[in-house]
């Protein structure tokens, strides 16, 4: 990551959108030493000595996006993605902070690996890349990893990434132990036994395609179990990605009991449904699977109501070898860092969601959950910012993506919303031509 | 249909499934198959429709009857037929399906007949080659020529398909035969039922046009056709049903259960049969059984499909 910009930065004539209040204000923004010194009409025309001035006329300026869930191939699968390539994809998509999942080879279950990732990101990445660490040794779900040492080494939360911890005793003890040092446990709720051979949402469509389905109960049973364990232990818990309406009711009940529980949803589950799989499109084979349109609509509504806290990219680079095979045999996952904003703007353009709500779920809420100072547009906050045109249309050409892998579900899609500048720590790290 | 009448061109380049075929397409194929039955019963069984053409049978799953049926069908129409089975192919050496498809495509075949264990694999392959592709079974998705041969067998024995009650019994969940038959029989106006334990019924099957029964006697009541499906051995050991014994007791077709169907009901099975598991031997070999006739119709239907697709093959002399 770049060091703080030595020169001041001025974002001139933008529309400054504070996702917390939804308030829009014209004028300029001045950043110095990596923080926002001031913005709005008060500093209009202010040009500190040696300042870099970026013209933002007609564009929205908002806090940089914070993605709580991205899989990066470093270490172990650098042919799919490195910290450097993922960070360039993130910068192009307006994501200024990326939390990297521990599903690497070796997995992030040793403090030395956390240290390696932090140093490697510092040296090669253009945005903030924060490691998440394994909850269990080897991500095997049986023995607790050194979660306190991992957290002290710099891991932002503890998770077994794409895997579920099926053993309730392990989860109970982890929640209990992590409570002592305020560790956050993030869990992918999907019972692998109930998923079985399932490769898409269970139902009529799967039956028609001759594919085995994964029921929603694979998610809801695991989520229900976890929340009962949270009630038992008082631990801090975040459901990584929920995918169906039934899960919302479970979250809602836990919240009403006052449990410290948050949840995320993937951008794919918010903007696509099972019908998009069409003729066995492998880029849409995801975990959790894309569900019914009713589930999608329920999650969009829950996002607007604040029941769903964050939107994640669930960025998961897969290469040709793992995706150009029959649907049932291909790997799960889609890339998303570079398209999450434009995909999310579909909801805004369709009138399903306010822009401020979208940005809050992609910046402010993740920052609050992670305890980061980013994600807010205010004086003294870190100058991690994006400048984007929410209306500008484009057709997604995978060849133009910065990610090393091209498995995007928006291949050839018509989208609106282009990030023109991405600023991290007061320095411009990406500008679109 | 008389041979002097001009035959409209079959409007599809591939046969990937029954889904997408109109009742008219299906009727045209069955009419063509009726003629092929006559050809196959002559001393001179050869036609020249595919003379000079190359047909590759690419089977990723072991098959005896379907593969030999396609081989005979191709040969009777004059094609050069090559069989490629997985055991001897580079798939074993790690080649992907798409690479195999492109390699075969470079050999300029006119037709590829594919069976694969994954649903959608044949569609995937069809997108990568220039020739016509016939689905000989893809996972639990479709097996269109089986449904067509079943329809031909029914039509020749009952004189019609419309209005008949057809009960499909057994492992519907894993069966591509059941799916293709369900789509075809519905399209042709039959009344379709599926019968099996709930663990072997796919979710949402009732919305695909089937009446669902878990009680075999009730499901067979009034049926004109009883279509039995094979139950794989690995699915009878406690995973989907507790045991062979229990399965046969409730879902095996014996004389007593068959007596619930119409007196003139006919029994079918796509093969290979597990005698004593889903069907009793005396029923399989009995007077109501059409099982051997289905095999004969299989060759005829595959000849009809090959002939219908011949109008779309690459390298046409008159484009």
Image (cartoon, rainbow, N blue to C red):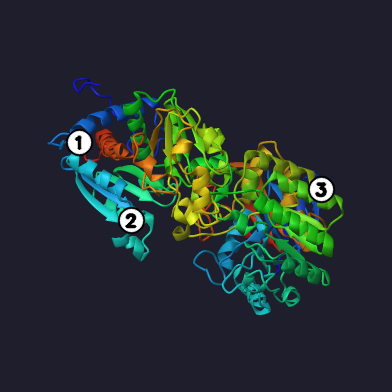
For the residues labelled 1 and 3, the Cα–Cα distance comes to 89 Å
In front here: B124 or A118? B124
Whether labels 1 and 3 share one chain: no
Tell me the tag on residue B40: 1
At 18% from the left edge and 34% from the top edge, which residue is drawn? B41
Q: Quadrant of the N terminus of chain A?
A: bottom right
Using the rendered view, name the quadrant where residue A145 is placed: bottom right
- Image coordinates of residue A348 in percent, x first then y, are 68, 40
In the picture provided, is B279 more to the left or to the right than A32? left
- Picture coordinates of residue B309, whole percent (x, y): 28, 36
Tag 2 subunit: B
**Residue A152 vertical placement versus B268 (above, below):** below
Q: Which one is earlier in the sequence, the residue at label 2 or at label 1?
A: 1
Q: How far separated are the C-alphas under marks 3 and 2?
A: 65 Å
Q: Which residue is mark 2?
A: B100
Q: Which residue was labeled with disc 3?
A: A41
Few, some or many residues within 10 Å of mark 3 (<14, 14–19, 20+): some
Disc nearest the viewer among 2 and 1:
1
State the residue at coordinates (74%, 60%).
Answer: A383
Secondary structure beneath label 2: helix
Label 1 lies in what chain? B
Dot 2 and dot 1 within a common chain? yes
- At 20% from the left and 23% from the top, the residue drawn is B3
Residue A365 image position (x, y, % from top left): 77, 55
């Amino acid at each position: 990551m770049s060091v703080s910009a030595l020169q001041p930065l001025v974002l001139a004539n933008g529309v400054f959108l504070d996702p917390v209040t939804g308030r829009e204000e014209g004028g300029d923004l001045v950043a110095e030493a990596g923080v926002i010194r001031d913005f709005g009409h008060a500093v209009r025309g202010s040009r500190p000595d040696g300042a870099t001035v970026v013209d933002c006329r007609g564009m929205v300026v908002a806090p940089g996006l914070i993605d709580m869930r991205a899989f990066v191939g470093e270490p172990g699968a650098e042919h799919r993605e490195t910290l450097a390539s993922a960070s360039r994809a993130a910068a192009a998509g307006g994501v200024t902070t990326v939390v990297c999942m521990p599903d690497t080879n070796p997995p992030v279950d040793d403090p030395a690996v956390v240290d390696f990732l932090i140093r490697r990101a510092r040296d090669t990445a253009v945005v903030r890349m924060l490691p998440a660490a394994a909850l269990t040794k080897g991500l095997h779900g049986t023995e607790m990893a050194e979660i306190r040492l991992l957290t002290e080494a710099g891991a932002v939360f503890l998770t077994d990434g794409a895997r579920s911890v099926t053993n309730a005793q392990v989860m109970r003890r982890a929640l209990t132990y992590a409570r002592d040092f305020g560790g956050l446990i993030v869990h992918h709720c999907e019972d692998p036994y109930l998923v079985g051979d399932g490769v898409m949402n269970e139902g009529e469509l799967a039956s028609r395609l001759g594919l085995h389905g994964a029921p929603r109960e694979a998610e809801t049973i695991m989520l229900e179990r976890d929340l009962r364990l949270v009630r038992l232990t008082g631990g801090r818990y975040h459901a990584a990605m929920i995918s169906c309406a039934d899960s919302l009711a479970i979250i809602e009940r836990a919240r009403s009991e006052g449990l410290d529980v948050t949840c995320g949803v993937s951008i794919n589950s918010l903007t696509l449904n099972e019908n998009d799989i069409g003729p066995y499109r492998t880029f849409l084979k995801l975990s959790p699977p894309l569900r019914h349109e009713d589930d999608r609509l329920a999650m969009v509504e829950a996002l607007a109501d604040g029941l769903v806290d964050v939107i994640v990219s669930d960025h998961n680079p897969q290469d040709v070898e793992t995706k150009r095979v029959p649907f049932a045999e291909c790997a799960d996952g889609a890339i998303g860092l570079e398209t999450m904003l434009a995909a999310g703007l579909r909801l805004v353009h369709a009138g399903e969601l306010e822009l401020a709500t979208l940005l809050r779920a992609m910046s402010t809420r993740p920052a609050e959950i992670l305890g980061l100072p980013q994600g807010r547009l205010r004086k003294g906050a870190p100058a991690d910012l994006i400048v984007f045109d929410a209306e500008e249309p484009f057709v997604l050409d995978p060849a133009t993506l910065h990610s090393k892998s091209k498995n995007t579900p928006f291949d050839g899609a018509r989208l609106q919303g282009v990030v023109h500048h991405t600023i991290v720590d007061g320095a411009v790290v990406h500008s679109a031509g | 249909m008389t041979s002097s009448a001009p035959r409209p061109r079959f409007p599809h380049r591939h046969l990937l499934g029954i889904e997408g075929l109109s009742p008219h397409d299906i009727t045209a194929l069955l009419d063509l198959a009726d003629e092929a039955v006559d050809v196959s019963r002559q001393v001179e069984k050869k036609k020249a429709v595919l003379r000079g053409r190359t047909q590759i049978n690419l089977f990723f799953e072991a098959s005896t009857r379907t593969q030999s049926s396609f081989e005979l069908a191709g040969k009777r129409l004059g094609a050069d037929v090559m069989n490629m089975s997985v055991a001897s192919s580079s798939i074993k050496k790690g080649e992907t399906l798409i690479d195999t498809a492109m390699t075969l495509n470079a050999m300029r075949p006119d037709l590829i007949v594919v069976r694969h264990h994954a649903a959608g694999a044949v569609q995937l392959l069809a997108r990568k080659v220039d020739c016509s592709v016939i689905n000989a079974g893809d996972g639990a998705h479709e097996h269109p020529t089986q449904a067509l041969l079943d329809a031909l067998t029914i039509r020749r024995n009952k004189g019609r398909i419309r209005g008949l009650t057809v009960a499909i019994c057994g492992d519907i969940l894993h069966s591509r035969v059941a799916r293709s038959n369900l789509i075809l029989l519905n399209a042709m106006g039959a009344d379709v039922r599926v019968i099996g334990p709930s663990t072997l019924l796919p979710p949402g099957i009732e919305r695909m046009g089937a009446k669902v029964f878990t009680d075999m006697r009730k499901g067979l009541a009034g049926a004109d056709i009883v279509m039995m499906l094979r139950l794989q051995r690995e699915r009878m050991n406690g995973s989907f049903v507790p045991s062979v014994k229990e399965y046969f007791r409730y879902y095996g077709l014996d004389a007593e259960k068959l007596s619930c169907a119409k007196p003139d009901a006919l029994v079918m099975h796509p093969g290979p049969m597990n005698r004593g598991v889903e069907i009793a031997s005396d029923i399989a070999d009995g007077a109501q059984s059409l099982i051997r006739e289905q095999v004969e119709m299989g060759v005829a239907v595959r000849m009809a499909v090959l002939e219908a697709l011949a109008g779309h093959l690459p390298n046409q002399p008159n484009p």
